[in-house]
Amino acid sequence: MEQLEFEEFYRDSRDACLRAVLVGTGNPHLAEDLVAEAYAQAWSAWRKVRAHPAPRAWIVRTALNTRVSWWRRRRREVALAGHDAEGRQQMQGVDPALLAAVRRLPRRQREVVGLRVFLDLDTEATAKTLGIAPGTVTTHLARAVAALRGDLATAITQEGQP
């Protein structure tokens, strides 16, 4: 019974969670790994996760926390030239220009956009997930939307020029 419930949760939420984590990381391969790890953790703690008020937010927060843990362990590693996935990989269903614009946002704004837009969480759930005040969520979202509007308007204007 629990396994079927978890499988349904996974099917219904994986794509939205992946998009939200992608917005937070900007790297499709890393987002895939983080989401897979978060779902593995969710399965091992399924009773707790299913009782959570926003299980999808739990997945995203766990994935982003895992990223921080991985970063701390690997911060001394050197990136190999030519292995940057940005610009080469695109997530299905996400406009590349929009994804590039979101990547340029500050980290907290990316996280708020990921949770509010891609997971469709309300302000309260987003605030709780990120550990910030609801007013801070509103402020970050407003600033992110303004920045995205300006960034995308500039991109559209430049596309129209010869």
Image (spheres, grey):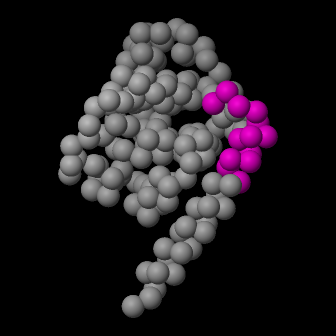
Q: Horizontal placement of 77 versus 131: left or right?
A: left
Q: Where is residue 143? Give x, y as percent.
A: 68, 55
Quarter of the view holding residue 159? bottom left
**In the rendered view of the protein, which quadrant contains the C terminus?**
bottom left
Residue 77 visible in this rendered orientation of the protein: yes
Which residue is painted at 28% across and 32% down in the image?
77
Which residue is painted at 37% across and 18% down in the image?
40
For this rendering, which residue is in front, 108 or 47?
Answer: 108
Count of numbered badges drawn on the protein: 0
Q: Where is residue 20? Give x, y as percent.
A: 50, 41
Quarter of the view holding residue 49? top right
Quarter of the view holding residue 149? bottom right
Instruction: Characterize the magenta stretch by its predominant secondary structure.
Output: helix
Q: Where is residue 11? Give x, y as percent.
A: 41, 31
For this rendering, which residue is in front, 96 or 11?
Answer: 96
State the residue lying farthest toward the right. Answer: 135
Q: Horizontal placement of 95 versus 148: left or right?
A: left
Q: Which residues are magenta?
A: 130-142
Residue 120 visible in this rendered orientation of the protein: no
For this rendering, which residue is in front, 57 or 73?
Answer: 73
**In the rendered view of the protein, which quadrant contains the N terminus?**
top left
